[in-house]
Amino acid sequence: MPMTFTVDPRSGVPIYLQLIEQVKRAVALGALISGEQLPTVKQLALDLTINPNTVARAYRELEREAVIDTAPGRGSFIRTDGAGNQTGHAAADVVRDVVDKTVREAKSLGAQRALLTEIFQGALDRWFPEAQ
Amino acid sequence: MSTVSIAHLRKTYGQFVAVDDLSLDIPSGCVFGLLGPNGSGKTTTFKCALGLARRDAGDIRYDNVSLVPQTFERIAYVPEKSVLFEGITVAEHMELTRRSFARFDVKRCAELLAGFGIDPRKRVRVLSKGMKTATAVALAFARTPDIMILDEPTSGLDPINQRVVLNLIVEASANGTTVVFSSHQIGQVERAAERIAIIDRGTLILEGAVDDLKARRKIVEGVVDEHFSVDGFAGDARVAYVEHNGRIIRLHAISNADDLAAELSARGAIGVRVLDLGLEDIFFQSVSTAASRPEA
């Protein structure tokens, strides 16, 4: 199995959410590609020494979010339909979470909307100079 | 199906109430972790559940049936203190277990013992405490029971063998075995258990799925001015308790942490953030809240 996951069981972030986030990130980065098989629930539970129902819960959620397909008796696979779009979709999810967290933190520190707009504009100008 | 149901269990030793009105429902195939300080009633609960101690009140059911002799064919129990016979060898224990339990897998037992590095020719007397525990664990898992009850199954073991035991729990669970175990090592419970209960002084303090508890229990922290009143949050059902030290306020949230954070901001707090809690934090939060409650 090429893909390696790690979880931090002591973290306050539920383990199943850590797994979901890692699979999505791996898909977004192209480390997991369409049609690629994930370890079985039992195998991943043993590899990480975590509860099998926790792994199953993460897989169920990933299936509900159309990231993977599970065929009974065959295993779980990264979805093949609309693979290009889907990869982009997962990337957008990751970015949205990061930006959302940043904006919430900035607001709680007392930053105003105008300041944040200015900061984001500056960052966009720096990383996408061609669009100016 | 292999459910375990404990209802309104009460056990006293003289004047001492070891377990008081304890109810636990353990679903089939679940790994259930029992946590609590020393003397909180974990071992007594196990003993009562297995009929090894006589309960004062309450009901114990396996698959909705009271404990009958046949139930013991399906349950394996590893007690905290070794009950192996000191004078005979590990191999002789295997033979005893094989004669007693039809489902005992001799080959599997030999593999498990080898995994722990235990020579079956050795007498129990010469084994360390940890190796006695490991022997009992190997004998129990090789019985492929439907229900496994383990009291401190990793005590005295080195980190590598602790991991071996945890993976046995994980594997058994993946194969449908219901596992109930106690441990003082919260990190192990956090890994292997799907649900946990925390008991303190014989009473249930907290019960739930580990991931759900982590998703709900948070600390909402913010900086407020010195005139800030905590009254609105102190009696809030979403808040276990409030810490208010100078300008820092911390709400120990039981639920809806994001809403509480928004409300705290709306009331003028700055730097409001939601902190995640590990199971160890949740354990201390629960046990200290319980300790501060007035005695019944």
Image (cartoon, grey):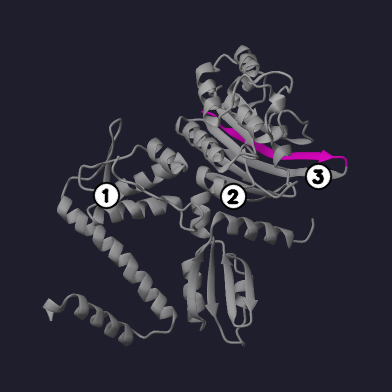
Q: Secondary structure at mark 1?
A: loop
| Residue at 36%, 48% in the rendered image | A5
Q: Tell me: residue B158, above or below residue A23.
A: above
Horizontally, is A58 left or right of B142 in the view? left
Labels 2 & 3 near each other (Cβ < 8 A):
no
Q: Main secondary structure of the magenta part?
A: strand
Q: Is residue B59 visible?
A: no
Label 2 lies in what chain? B
Q: Secondary structure at mark 3?
A: strand
Which residue is tagged 3? Answer: B17
Please give the label number shown on residue B171.
Answer: none
Q: Given this view, does label 2 or label 3 mark the residue nearer the observer? A: 2
Q: Do marks 2 and 3 share a subunit?
A: yes
**Amino acid type of disc 3?**
Val
Label 1 lies in what chain? A
| Residue at 29%, 51% in the rendered image | A65
Task: Write down the region rendered in magenta.
Answer: B1-14
Please give the label number shown on residue B186.
Answer: 2
Q: Is residue B247 visible?
A: yes
- State which quarter of the image contains the N terminus of chain A: top left
Residue B76 picture quarter: top right
